[in-house]
Amino acid sequence: MKRFLAAVQFLTVVPASSPVPPAAGALFFPLVGALLGAAAGAVQVAALRLFPASIASLFALAFLIMITGALHEDGLADVFDAFRAGRSPERIHAILKDSRIGAFGALALVIAVLLRWQSIGLLGAGAIPALAAAVGASRGAMVAFAYLSEPAGEGLGKAFCRDLRPALAAAAALQAAALPFLRGPEAGSAALIGNALAILAARAYFHRRIGGITGDCLGALCQLSETLLLLIFICPLFT
């Protein structure tokens, strides 16, 4: 229970308190993500009884953003602001610590939100399992990404990478690999490959630029994974 509460505390704004560090709850990251996604899907299905799909999906996405405290959206914006061509690692770290959002971060955030909003609107009656799969698998991908990467700088990212145990990372990765198959074998296979490529590409990029990852890098990968999976789930090639 302590590990589950640690995952809830790390991934949501739900008032949960746990004496163990967030990495100890990594086993439950995909489960907590799946529960959040299923709840957002339920909001979508309920709202469809009163509103068009575009409005219902906006309610679902708003719920998801609010329940998570926009934690990973913040990481995505910070990463796109910081990692401009030609910037030194020192300059990148300084921008990551800046609470202000620049033009690149704002644009990345808007594009990611629009892609997720439109994708959720096209899920229809399958919104609950699809969102459970996308949100849960993206949280599991974040754990795998942290385990495969070296920490850069100080802060939450370093503590999470340092405390993460191989067995917990492997269990979270297996859950992340399995959850997309709720959408079917073709979508599940595509999601598995897409997630793996996203993790490897992000690791190579961040290690080349700053020698490792930070907490913002984890949040950015989580958002990219969730968006990618939703796009796969609505792609005609995999439905």
Image: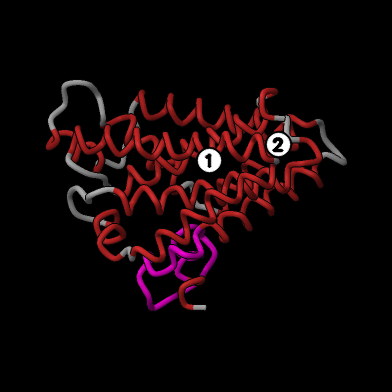
Q: Indicate which disc, 2 or 1, sits on the residue closer to the N terminus.
A: 2
Instruction: Indicate the amino acid at tag 1.
Output: Leu
Residue 35 sits in quarter = bottom right
| Vertical order, 159 against 194 (above or below) | below
Which residue is depicted at the point 22% across and 49% down?
150
Side of 69 relative to 121 (left or right): left
Please tell me whether mark 2 or mark 1 is closer to you in this view: 1
Instruction: Indicate the amino acid at tag 2.
Output: Ser
Is the C terminus in the top left, top right, bottom left or bottom right quadrant? top right
Q: Position of residue 23 (x, y in %)?
A: 37, 64
Which residue is depicted at the point 12% across and 30% down?
88
Q: Nearer the viewer, residue 112 or 207?
A: 207
Q: Nearer the viewer, residue 40 or 202?
A: 202
| Vertical order, 52 against 85 (above or below) | below
SS at badge 2: helix
Residue underneath mark 2: 57
Residue 192: mark: 1
Work out how far the residue at label 2 is from the one at label 1, CA to CA, in angstroms. 25 Å
Q: Nearer the viewer, residue 39 or 26?
A: 26
